[in-house]
Image: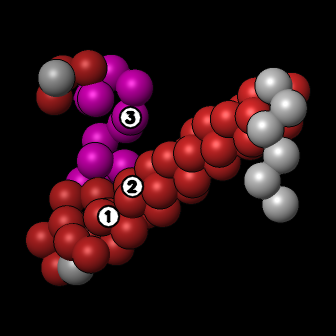
Amino acid sequence: MVNALRYFMNQDTLTFLAWIWAHNPLVIVLLAGIPALFSLVVIDTHRHRKNEHRKRDMGNHNY
């Protein structure tokens, strides 16, 4: 896994990320967590709208 990361990222980038992780890991967690949360919100919204359209198409109107 580490070798794969080194293949795609140069040594300076890995050193920089290691320095950030050593001094303030919250930054790395937030940078990884925000896109993950955003994608989960998008998926959940899509699923909710899909269910609402399905209910509407079947004639179950609960306004």
Query: CA–CA distance between discs 3 and 1?
Result: 16 Å
The residue beneath circle 2 is 32
The image shows residue 47 at horizontal and vertical percentages of 62, 36
Q: Is residue 36 above or below residue 23?
A: above
User: Residue 32: x, y in percent?
Assistant: 39, 55
* Quadrant housing the N terminus: top left
Please tell me which residue is depicted at 17% across the width and 79% down the height of the picture: 23
Q: CA distance from mark 1 to mark 2?
A: 6 Å
Residue 17: % across, % down:
29, 58
**Which amino acid, by three-letter code, is at mark 3?**
Met
Which residue appears at 20% of the width and 59% of the height? 18
**CB contact under 8 Å: marks 1 and 2:** yes
- Residue 44 position in % (x across, y down): 57, 45
For the point 29% across and 42% down, the residue is 11
In this rendering, the answer to whether 48 lies above or below 54 is below
Upstream in the sequence, badge 3 or badge 1? Answer: 3
Can residue 45 be seen by looking at this rendering? yes
Q: Which residue is mark 1?
A: 28
For residue 41, side relative to residue 56 (left or right): left
| Residue mark closest to the camera, 3 vs 2 | 2
**Stretch of the chain drawn in magenta:** 5-16
Q: Does 27 sit above or below residue 1?
A: below
Q: Which residue is tagged 3?
A: 9
What's the amino acid at mark 2?
Ala
